Image (cartoon, grey):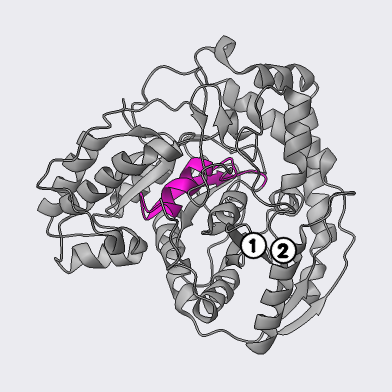
Amino acid sequence: MNDRADAPPDTARDDDDLLFAGVAGQADAVREGRLSSRELVGAVLARIQRHDGRLNAFTVVAAERALAEAAARDAQRDGRGPLHGVPIAVKEEIDVAGEVTTFGGRANRTPRASDGEVVRRLRAAGAVIVGKTNMPEFGQWPFTESVAHGITCNPWDTARSPGGSSGGTAAAVAAGLVPAAIGGDGGGSIRIPAAFCGLYGLKPQRGRVTSAPAEHLWWALGTVGPLTRTVLDSALVYDAIRGAGSGDRFRADDPRRSFVDAARAEPRPLRIGVITRSGIRGVRPDREHVRAVHATADLLDALGHHVESLEPRFPDTTTAFVPQFLGGVRAELAHVERPDLVERRTRQALRLGLWATPRVVAGAMRRGETIAARVEPTFDRYDVLLTPVTPHRPPQVGVLDGVGLVGAARRSLPVTAYTALWNVTGNPAASVPAGFAADGLPLAVQLVGRRGDEPTLLTLSAELERARPWAGARPAL
């Protein structure tokens, strides 16, 4: 249901400072009584109506439901959670009660009867769900373009892609339509859109966030998490949603401290290894991306960290990644009502991927663990790795226009040159804003941590944010 309606006049406020205040700022405003949740949600809905026609970030805007939920939050006096009254959006692949989980396509028609576990936890923390965000069908591509829902545009330049597959999520947050939105990352799908849109995007450790009701998200590759304007905002959302469920295939050990405590912690000197060479032969990083990495390395050195360059020869991940990717798409397709309505590219992928049987996928996951074991000694020497997020600048929209599976794969593979390895190994990795390039679009760098060590990434990311603030930058819509 898409009730993309005008917010009632008495609930709509036009206050850009408020709308760009992020999760922490909006939660403080509601908690301190400077405005009600209903007023805040009304302002968000008004901004969505005003700007999303140019962006196509949302597939569903549940205006009436969100206002009713906000009113219920305002009536609540006891047991208010850390996200009380804050409007949040979720990616199309995540179940929201009363809405169709489309996976970015046309093959599902029936609304879900109940929330996915991440949405249930968001509501339990007090969040108000305002809608669902666009994605490519089954999240297959790092560009948010589909036959069913069209093209999502980058708020910094609407002729450019916001990346994918969580491109609608990124565009919504970057444009100030919501302070945070939930995405998913099976090969870079949180980090790539965060980099293209100037946001903070942490891919968590495998098993850190539940995938329920699904047993897994693309087998061992996929994770769920927020895209936000600040590190603290990300930590606040993660502390509300993290933790495995009883039916999850993968589980992470509890972190040594809360993510909010990590984001607020005093940094300690770290050993940081700098990598600029791409993991895919023939893919060379844009010089602006190399410059961003070197500038960040210099800043980290000035902040007291030990920084040095390295040129590791990490294993090729193809035989681990591709079967899990194809097997993951096949697993999601098994839950749609009309498989005959999926896109041509998806049908081609399914035909070519018939060899990705459960036995082959199981073997691919074992190869992934072998790769992880070969990579892990790097973290005996370094606490964190610093790399580009993507090799290239955000492309013009229409990347997938008129191309089949081979063309889409050829255009997509280079984009994941620095990100997909960490889905195979399961390590946490974050896209951190790093200023702007000559084209006026954001720059970013990637920080990669040891298995299970999101706290170190959050502390280091927050230190970079203090030294080089980024959250005040706003696209001129």
User: Can you identify the residue that label 1 sits on?
Assistant: 438
Of the pair 35 and 351, the residue shown nearer to us:
35
Against 469, residue 354 (above or below) is: above
Question: Going by the picture, which residue comes out furthest to the top?
Answer: 340
Q: Residue at x 59, y 35 (%)?
A: 139
Mark identifier at residue 197: none
User: In the rendered structure, are the residues bearing label 1 and label 2 in contact, judged by CB atoms less than 8 Å apart?
Assistant: yes
The percent position of residue 377, horizontal first and vertical second, equals: 82, 68
The percent position of residue 286, horizontal first and vertical second, equals: 76, 58
Instruction: Give SS at disc 1.
Output: loop
User: Can you identify the residue that label 2 sits on?
Assistant: 288
Relative to 316, 383 lies left or right:
left
Q: Residue at x 22, y 66 (%)?
A: 29
Q: Is residue 184 magenta?
A: yes
Relative to 333, 21 lies left or right:
left
Q: Which residues are magenta?
A: 162-187
The percent position of residue 186, horizontal first and vertical second, equals: 64, 43
Q: Residues within 10 Å of mark 1 (few under 14, many from 20)?
A: few
Of the pair 22 and 109, the residue shown nearer to us:
22
Query: As shown in the figure, which amino acid type bears the numbered disc 1?
Result: Ala
Q: Is residue 40 magenta?
A: no
Q: Quadrant of residue 460?
A: bottom right
The percent position of residue 64, horizontal first and vertical second, equals: 20, 35
Instruction: Give SS at disc 2.
Output: helix
Q: Residues within 10 Å of mark 2 (few under 14, many from 20)?
A: some
